[in-house]
Image (cartoon, rainbow, N blue to C red):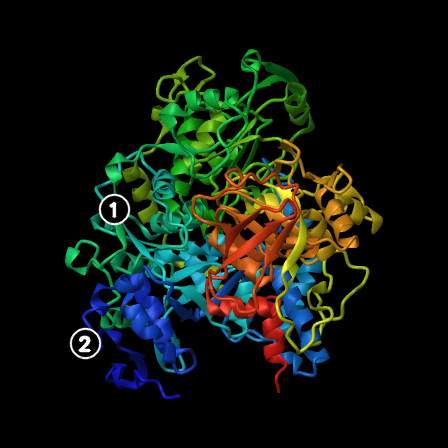
Amino acid sequence: MSNPFAHIVEPLDPQRPDHKFFNLSKLGDPRYDRLPFSIRVLLESAVRNCDEFLVKKGDVESILNWKKTQTETVEVPFRPARVILQDFTGVPAVVDFAAMRDAVKQLGGDPEKINPICPADLVIDHSIQVDFNRKTDSLQKNQDLEFERNRERFEFLKWGSKAFRNMRIIPPGSGIVHQVNLEYLARVVFDQDGFYYPDSLVGTDSHTTMIDGLGVLGWGVGGIEAEAVMLGQPISMVLPEVIGYKLQGTPNKFITSTDIVLTVTKHLRQVGVVGKFVEFFGPGVAQLSIADRATIANMCPEYGATAAFFPVDDVSVQYLEQTGRDPEKLCYISQYLRAVGMYRNFSDPSQDPEFTQVVELNLCTVVPCCSGPKRPQDRVPIADMKKDFETCLGTKQGFKGFQVLPERHAISVPFQYNGEDYSLSHGSVVIAAITSCTNTSNPSVMLGAGLLAKNAVKHGLSVKPYIKTSLSPGSGVVTYYLKESGVMDYLSQLGFEVVGYGCMTCIGNSGPLPEPVVEAITQGDLVAAGVLSGNRNFEGRVHPNTRANYLASPPLVIAYAIAGSVRIDFENEPIAINPQGKEVYLRDIWPTREEIQNVERQFVIPAMFKEVYAKIENVNERWNSLKSPSDKLYTWDPKSTYIKSPPFFEGLTRDLKPPQSIKDAYVLLNLGDSVTTDHISPAGNIARNSPAARYLTSRGLTPRDFNSYGSRRGNDAVMARGTFANIRLLNKFLGKQAPSTIHLPTGETMDVSDAAEKYQKDGHPLLVLAGKEYGSGSSRDWAAKGPFLLGIKAVLAESYERIHRSNLVGMGVIPLEYLPGDTSDSLGLTGRERYTVVIPEKITPRMTVEIKLDTGKTFNVRMRFDTDVELTYFQHGGILNYMIRKMSEK
């Protein structure tokens, strides 16, 4: 089919007539100029690919008619320009690709058709742990241990980089995927085969949205969906609503970008933006650096939106220049974006698009804050922290409660560490980590932390030695400017040595706490605290022994480490008393924005970025020396406990089987609200008494060799046993937190995977009941793959987080949703009933289906297949099955 928009193709530069672009601003359609900038990228994608996809369905017209069609379910195709992965999600993706090649070959097709069509970059950043800290050799020791634990995984990834075209691996020790993307991988505008178009991407990590701060439209998807995109399948999405978030005013000189993003997160959770785009506009945006914008965009999953977009402006181009991008590329980026009307002046209200809804924030109203103790959206102003924590102590068990008896609030447990006497109480800080993509990408907060450390040391302050302090920069550039600006030595003196380049504490790779600290916490049943500059603080995520975890800016992480407790009022109480007996307050050591910006202008320079990234792909000698096979088909090692051929495609045939009703299913788990993907598929340490540990022990491993769930994502036998293995899982069947359930036929309490195995042996299908926001958190595909392997055929919830619902669809697990006004309580469901889900022969998107209980009760629910394409995937038994059948066609 010829492209119907060929008439508006024109050269970008008259001197280079072979370099062209679609100039959609010349459509002559007044609707185009009112579109949100993020929707314009979708339109570019549809037009660029419209000779291939669905033009007959009027996609372009639907997008142009965005304002009018928001109330309808309008399906549009979106083909991202590229895909980005990290190793925890990248390993299972490459495992799936290897297994898909085997399956295509078995069906008589060409296995090499299983190959990325668009560029796919994989950054290894999730494997390193904080095993060593506070020593100058901590970085080297942690990196050595990372290779010792993960050599097999790394060799497998290196095989993948050779076996598949268009797949690039950024080796361990390089940085965090989203910062590397921001500083190095992002194109902003693609120039491919003489054609210009906007950079866009999807990633297998929920915080892929960080790149939206640079004007690149991107968001996290499940690994399963990303694999389909890599194989050339467009994402079929419902045209989203776009919330305009207007920023005005100037932030207080003591405010950080972390304070802003935590304020935005709470605000947008209240507004309700799940499944929507958020686009930032207004004069306040011009006050924010790209690092500030990236911080706000990064935490998009925490406020529930699909994307959080900042269009390109002068500040964006200056950032590209600062990070060492090629001057010729900067020229055509600006030229192209201006030509298509996608270059923004935030001070010009005439450029403001139409939005579904507009909400506002005056930056001058933002105050210093943290979020916690268990969720990112639970913002607490620093002035209220002490009172808020003490209230949480006595409040009923929940997101803001620990249910500690009043007489135990003041308990203190003495212990010895390195021959010195100390004590712990509720609120004592035992982990203080400057970590994660959210903040370590931002020079203003990192230099702010360094300047605060400098001031603290000069005032004679220190951090107690038992507190596990760490610094995990997002890239080598961060270490470079911290050293050049002279603040690294002060950070080291307070215990914040560089321990690795990766996600580390933010994803639960915190490493062990000192044994005396663990014993004191256990003895007193203490609510010990972790403070981290991360984006997630769900229960059980950061460390099993920190029941309270607070998200904070890097300077505040250091402040709480010095104070030693979150039970402090920084305004009215000294942060510490120095050796001379003088009271020192936080305000005495806190640097201003002007001080920080002066240092940033002097020391964060293009030469640093050019030097670091010129050698990023081959600087790691241990990676360079790894050996890997060059065969196009992977030779599976049956002895491996890391890499295993998954059973997803066993018995797959060319022929489709019609969908069947789910008959007399038992409920495996009866869950409440805000069940996260951390609850469903943990990423941290493998508990020694867990089913996964028993499996690894049976394979001859000792606990020292267990590694983490995240590192084992290439082995379905471990991951299925780890599904619902989070110690903080609250199952209504038990009435307490535990990774267990009741096997209903026998009444026996069992580990979840053991109960599922027993149900499967008896031929019983399974369901999960849940409340609101089921599947919030990280975009891990094992939170869908694991339930599939346990025999779960459907989930019935009040609402879903976007990525997890998509992942369930991708695995052929049916996402069912209560109709408005219905809940398990209003319907009188106990979870002990048997459930039959009646699936008709003809299925349509978002259709209502009937559930029949063995009690005789019936009720209706909505089947959350939102598009025709999702229904196609379901009919094939999942998206990967669909791709295998498609690739097997001759």
Label 1 neighbour load within 10 Å: few <14, some 14-19, many 20+: many
Say which of 418 and 351 sits in front.
Answer: 351
- Residue holding disc 1: 247
Asked if residue 157 lies left or right of residue 283, the reply is right
In which quadrant of the rendered image does the C terminus lie? bottom right
Label 2 neighbour load within 10 Å: few <14, some 14-19, many 20+: few
Residue occupying image coordinates x 41% and y 45%: 303
Please say whether residue 833 is visible from this viewpoint.
yes
The secondary element bearing badge 2 is classed as loop
- Image coords of residue 231 (percent x, y): 55, 73
Whether 705 is drawn above or below 4: the answer is above
The secondary element bearing badge 1 is classed as strand
Please say whether residue 143 is visible from this viewpoint.
no
Say which of 503 and 235 sits in front.
Answer: 235
Query: What is the three-letter code of the residue carrying label 2?
Result: Gly
Say which of 303 and 806 sits in front.
Answer: 806
Whether 591 is drawn above or below 664: the answer is above
Whether 267 is drawn above or below 781: the answer is above
In which quadrant of the rendered image does the N terminus lie? bottom left
- Image coords of residue 826 (percent x, y): 50, 39
- Image coords of residue 615 (percent x, y): 52, 63
Say which of 415 and 107 sits in front.
Answer: 107
Residue occupying image coordinates x 44% and y 29%: 559
Query: What is the three-letter code of the residue carrying label 1?
Result: Leu
Where on the picture, by quarter, is residue 547?
Answer: top right
From the image, state whether disc 2 or disc 1 is nearer to you. Answer: 2
Residue occupying image coordinates x 46% and y 49%: 819
- First-in-chain label (2 vs 1): 2
Asked if residue 495 lies left or right of residue 320, the reply is right
- Residue holding disc 2: 28
- Image coords of residue 511 (percent x, y): 64, 39
